């Protein structure tokens, strides 16, 4: 096994130090310090607009920080986005798919983007189609698929190159309860051997999937710790409202 | 290279998977045919008039030199074809970047290990490939008919090259407009506006000084194209069109990079 494969098997380390991002006068993320260990499933919680998606976009190199830095395995997406993107798979909140392509064609396209070709591509496609239970819809147009299937296709494209870091943003948003259970089931099956960053505002999702969580409120980290400690108390929503852990008075509304 | 090929293939699949490509090709073929046959009809009418014994003052069997297939049919058709392209090309280019931005698939491309240069190269190549196909379709009628009229193959190739380069220049403007917005309508309408402005600045020469007029003459698309339609292939004209394409590619690439800061 090569050093690269060993690294992928262990998962990636994510570190953010003083990470800040402004959008004009609005501070979407403010001085965030965060560390995610290799191989762990980490939940990033927060209400809508808390800064979760901004953090993801900074980690993937899609946008640049205003201050501070985030690194994946010590590599900064600001300086070497291609090296970082080779290590990660990203499932956005709304699946970014091409409705005019067929499922298999789309996955073949993404495999091409990831440099997977020939016999390896054939093998990888068979594996993901089976793993994400997409064999039955492989020849169907993406535009004709249900939301649940689209989410599975989105997960499959992020998993094609066996990334050491999988970033999943609001994976069950807009899905019916049955589809939510299916997607959670798929994510649960991906744990171990890779780091998973799960960004959501769904407490049940984090409780069932993540070992450790961080909670963002209006761009500021207000709590960080084991999910069983943070999310099983009398008022697990307290941190959502901006209260730092240990602050009995509650936070800003 | 694998990523470039994958994106190029996807672009062509999406383009030919939508009705726009077929609509544009059909429209261009029909409009070219109508324009060509209309000029051919006028040419035949003139021939008939000159040949008619009722034309007093002319010898019945004398046809003036300037009434020939080349000058009466081919050149006017090519000139009109240049103007005709201003409408269908923006329909092809409008969604190339704008639609990716609107649906968020640009995020997939920009986080899948593709560099902005690869994205620009693949999208420009696919669009220019379609332009060549479109020009071949539009060129079919005039060429098949005019081949009998004594126009040399070299001249025909020069005209075709001019048409392709003009199409590439208009498409380059369209791709820049598409990269600057997430709306297809805005991209198409701004492309048409900018191209009309750039097509021929001749109307403005009487309002500006000689120096400015010279600069505007260089920037106008039409003078560069019209030399090709006369059969003159000049390195300066080729360079002009290629520089436009390169400048457009650089602007689009910069806009993708800029989005990392401003998105």
Image (spheres, rainbow, N blue to C red):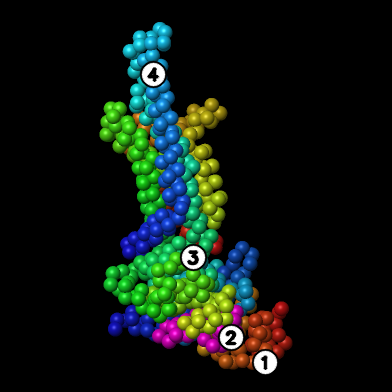
Q: Is residue A208 left or right of residue B81?
A: right
Task: Provide the chain ID for the residue under circle 2.
Answer: A
Does the magenta segment cover residue B130? no
The residue that mark 2 highlights is A204
Give the CA separation, mark 1 to mark 3: 44 Å
Q: Which residues make up the magenta segment?
A: A188-209
Q: Mark on residue A234?
A: 1
Q: Which mark is residue A143?
A: 3
The answer to whether marks 1 and 3 sit on the same chain is: yes
Task: Please check whether the numbered discs 2 and 3 fall on a single chain.
Answer: yes
Judged left or right of residue B243, residue B203 is right
Query: In the picture, which quadrant includes the N terminus of chain B?
Result: bottom left
Q: CA distance from mark 4 to mark 2?
A: 87 Å
Give the answer, above or below, for where B132 lies relative to A79. Answer: above
The CA span between labels 2 and 3 is 30 Å
Q: Which residue is mark 4?
A: B48
């Amino acid at each position: 096994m090569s050093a690269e494969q060993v690294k992928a098997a262990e998962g990636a380390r994510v570190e953010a130090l003083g990470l800040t991002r402004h959008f004009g006068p609005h501070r979407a993320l403010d001085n965030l310090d965060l560390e995610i260990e290799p191989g762990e499933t980490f939940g990033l919680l927060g209400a809508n607009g808390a800064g979760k998606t901004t953090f993801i976009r900074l980690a993937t190199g899609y946008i640049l920080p205003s201050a501070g830095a985030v690194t994946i395995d010590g590599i900064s997406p600001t300086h070497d986005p291609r090296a970082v993107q080779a290590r990660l798979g990203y499932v956005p909140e709304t699946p970014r798919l091409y409705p005019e392509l067929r499922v298999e064609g789309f996955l073949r396209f993404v495999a091409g983007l990831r440099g997977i070709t020939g016999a390896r591509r054939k093998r990888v496609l068979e594996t993901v189609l089976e793993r994400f239970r997409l064999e039955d819809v492989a020849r169907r147009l993406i535009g004709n698929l249900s939301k649940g299937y689209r989410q599975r296709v989105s997960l499959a494209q992020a998993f094609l190159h066996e990334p050491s870091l999988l970033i999943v943003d609001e994976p069950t948003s807009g899905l019916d309860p049955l589809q939510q259970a299916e997607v959670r089931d798929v994510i649960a099956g991906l744990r171990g051997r890779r780091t998973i960053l799960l960004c959501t505002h769904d407490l049940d999702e984090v409780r069932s999937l993540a070992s450790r969580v961080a909670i963002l409120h209006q761009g500021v980290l207000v709590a960080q710790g084991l999910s069983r400690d943070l999310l099983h108390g009398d008022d697990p929503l307290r941190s959502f409202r901006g209260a730092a852990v240990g602050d009995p008075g509650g936070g800003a509304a | 290279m694998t990523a470039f090929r994958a994106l190029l293939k996807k672009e062509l699949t999406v383009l030919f998977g939508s009705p726009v490509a077929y609509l544009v090709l059909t429209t261009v073929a029909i409009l070219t045919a109508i324009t060509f046959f209309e000029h051919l009809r006028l040419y035949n009418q003139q021939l008939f008039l000159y040949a008619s014994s009722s034309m007093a003052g002319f010898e019945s069997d004398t046809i003036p030199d300037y009434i020939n297939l080349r000058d009466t049919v081919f050149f006017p058709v090519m000139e009109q074809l240049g103007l005709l392209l201003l409408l269908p090309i923006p329909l092809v280019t409008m969604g190339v970047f704008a639609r990716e931005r609107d649906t968020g698939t640009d995020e997939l491309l920009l986080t899948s290990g593709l560099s902005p240069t690869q994205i620009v190269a693949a999208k420009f190549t696919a669009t220019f490939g379609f332009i060549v196909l479109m020009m071949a379709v539009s060129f079919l009628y005039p060429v098949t008919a005019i081949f009998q009229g004594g126009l040399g193959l070299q001249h025909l190739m020069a005209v075709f090259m001019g048409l392709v380069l003009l199409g590439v220049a208009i498409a380059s403007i369209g791709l820049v407009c598409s990269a600057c917005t997430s709306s297809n309508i805005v991209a198409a309408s701004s492309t048409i506006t900018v191209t009309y402005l750039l097509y021929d600045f001749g109307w403005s020469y009487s309002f500006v000084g000689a120096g400015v007029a010279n600069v505007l003459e260089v920037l106008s698309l039409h003078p560069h194209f019209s030399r090709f339609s006369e059969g003159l292939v000049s390195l300066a004209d080729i360079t002009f069109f290629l520089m436009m394409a390169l400048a457009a590619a650089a602007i689009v690439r910069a806009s993708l990079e800029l989005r990392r800061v401003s998105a």
